[in-house]
Amino acid sequence: MRFPKKQSLLLISILFLAAVLRFWHFSTNPPGLYWDEVANGYNAYSILKTARDEYGNFMPLTFRAFNDYRPALAVYTLIPTIVLFGLNEVGVRFPAATLGVITILLTYLLVKEFFRDEKIALTSSLFLSIASWHINFTRAQFEASFMLFFSLLALFLFLKSFKNFKLLVLSSVFFALALNSYQGAKVWIPIFLAAIIFWYRKELLIFGTKLLLPLAILTVSTMPIVLDFQNSLMRGKSVSIFNNNKHPKESFFSGYLSHYSPNFLFISGDSIGRHNVSGMGQLFVFEIPLILIGLFVLLRQKSRTKNFLFTWFLLAPLPAAISTPAPHALRAITFLPLWSIIGAIGLIKLINFHLKPAIKILLLFLLFSVGFYNVLTYLHLYYNHYPKEKALDWQDGYKEMVTYVGSVQNKYRSISITKAYGQPYIFVLFYLKYDPKKYQLQSEDKNKFDKFNFYPPNIDSGENTLIITTEDVASTHNLLKQFKLRGGDVVFEAREP
Amino acid sequence: MKYVLIFILAIYLIFKSTPQLKFCNIDTAKMAIPPRIFFDSAIDGRAQHVLVTRFFHNKVGIFSNELGRCYFGTIEPYYLFNTLGFIGFAAWLFAMFEFTLSKRWKILALILLLPLVPFIQFGYWKIIPYTHKVISLAGFILFMKRHEK
């Protein structure tokens, strides 16, 4: 594929911008690795060292982790980066950031394939590169971003496959990988595939019996789910709207429509701390008129592309709508990069409007000014406010605490660590790089291993013990050290009885 | 037949209960400003230049944010769905599409500016759901007319 020189330079600039926004200080912001990142990282480390996960399962197709039996792909992709960078923040977050940047390129290629319009393609990729929704989920190891990458890659290869069967086979391989990348993919990928097959059935049927091969690949890809069916459904059941809910229909409609809520999209965003900066929506305010124009232009088109994109637009919230809480920006990552594409269509249409030049220049200047302010504000909130406001959501403080524990552990017979912030055992394993072989022998008991106890229930306050607790001004134990969040609040205290 | 359907929808919309909108007006927007300025300034800290803090955290920005929250609350999709029902909501969307297609800018301007009226405490909040019901009925009529052709 040849790129004209000017467009190549623009695309490279956009990719460079995307890379800066995803890699710049990504090991320290988001502040701290949260428990899913740590669990995936340690299990990847365990596979690297022993070919077994933390429970001793040989090369598992699903990872038990916190009894949520998560899909395996996101863990296995960490192995090369842990080899390169070590078991740390960079090793864990590097793949997501890299795939996030490549997703921008994929967006460009996809939009070119859909619309054969260089300007819309470049603008879509620019909008996605600065999209807070995408940046938030590619600076940390969120499995959903892997699903997004593989599904877009699979879609692109599919669109190129109409005269090349090998690309269809490759596309099915990447859909198979997408299915095994994230819990929500079990719902999204079949729906997405159904939409693709419906709108492009004529091109598919031409292949005739050859379709059995990609079908076989997709069938095999469901094996990790089918072979461990009960456990594969565990996470889904725990968040499902059909679980112990007297009004599932209302929950569904409320959840579904909440993802189109202007407040969710432009004002307040997702309320879950890890998913969004406070004070901003999932999209920027300057995109409002562009999205309205883009939606209107798209609806007026009479093309299969419009039908497919509009189907995608209506189906995207389904994985989030059948689970709680809603709206849920992570489960609705399936919307990306649609919002960017629609906004890009709107911007190009606006530029091509027949208006007096002075009015057009004024409108575009206003739009650019508001857009510039929006993006700057987001960057300020993300780099200045977010690490302080959301430190607890990211379980900040664990690294410093465990590093301290590691430096003094030889002095103590027993070390008791509070479970107040969830799953302390995995943080101890991760930051101490505990030998996976040793841990696998004692992994069933999550309340203790080696000299470490996690309370409740197990607290040892006898002689020669160290207790890691939450801030406790009433405690009579001797305070050795406090560990603070970025915002200054005490999160852990190290005390001796 | 079409008049019967329009009549049924009209009756349904008139008698359908309307959910309560969140209490929200110019006073609540103004009240939100001081605590948010204080919170944001505290996070920024004294090390940051006051002009930078004011650039990102200012009364205009926070007021606009609160105004947006109040305004968008009146066109929340789930609120519209509960106010109009499934068919009424679809008809409302169709109406907005048709008004844009036929370039009825004055009607669109009126619809888009109407939620500001109770915000500035000039009218009663009930004007909002009943405006939506009228738009929905108009959308249904336009849909029937289009398919009559």
Image (spheres, grey):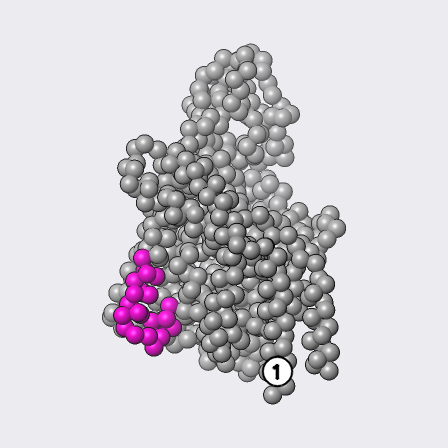
Q: Nearer the viewer, residue B77 or A160?
A: B77
Residue depicted at 47% across the width and 51% down the height: B67
Residue depicted at 69% across the width and 65% down the height: B14
Q: Quadrant of the N terminus of chain A?
A: bottom left
Q: What stretch is highlighted in magenta?
A: A347-369
Q: Where in the figure is residue A472, as x and y percent of width and height?
A: 53, 20
Q: Main secondary structure of the magenta part?
A: helix
Residue A203 visible from this viewpoint = yes
Q: Which of B124 and A203 is in front in this view?
A: B124
Is-magenta flag for residue A355?
yes
Question: To which residue does mark 1 refer?
Answer: B145
A333 over A377 or under it: above or below: below
A32 over B3 or under it: above or below: above
Image side of residue B70 versus residue A371, left or right: right
Which chain's residue wears label 1?
A: B
- Figure quadrant of residue B89: bottom right
Q: Quadrant of the C terminus of chain A?
A: top right
Count the labels in the image: 1
Is-magenta flag for residue A147?
no
Q: Where in the figure is residue A109, as x and y percent of width and height?
A: 39, 69
Q: Where in the figure is residue A347, as x and y percent of width and height?
A: 37, 68
- Figure quadrant of residue A399: top left
Residue A156 visible from this viewpoint = no
Residue depicted at 60% across the width and 25% down the height: A455
Q: Which of A472 and A349 is in front in this view?
A: A349
Q: Which amino acid does label 1 sit on?
A: Lys
Q: Is mark 1 on a helix, strand or loop?
A: helix
Q: Where in the figure is residue A59, as x and y percent of width and height?
A: 55, 48
Q: Which of A413 and A148 is in front in this view?
A: A148
Residue depicted at 52% across the width and 51% down the height: B121
Report the residue that reaches farthest toward the left.
A5
Q: Within 10 angstroms of label 1, few (less than 14), some, or many (20 or more) residues? A: few
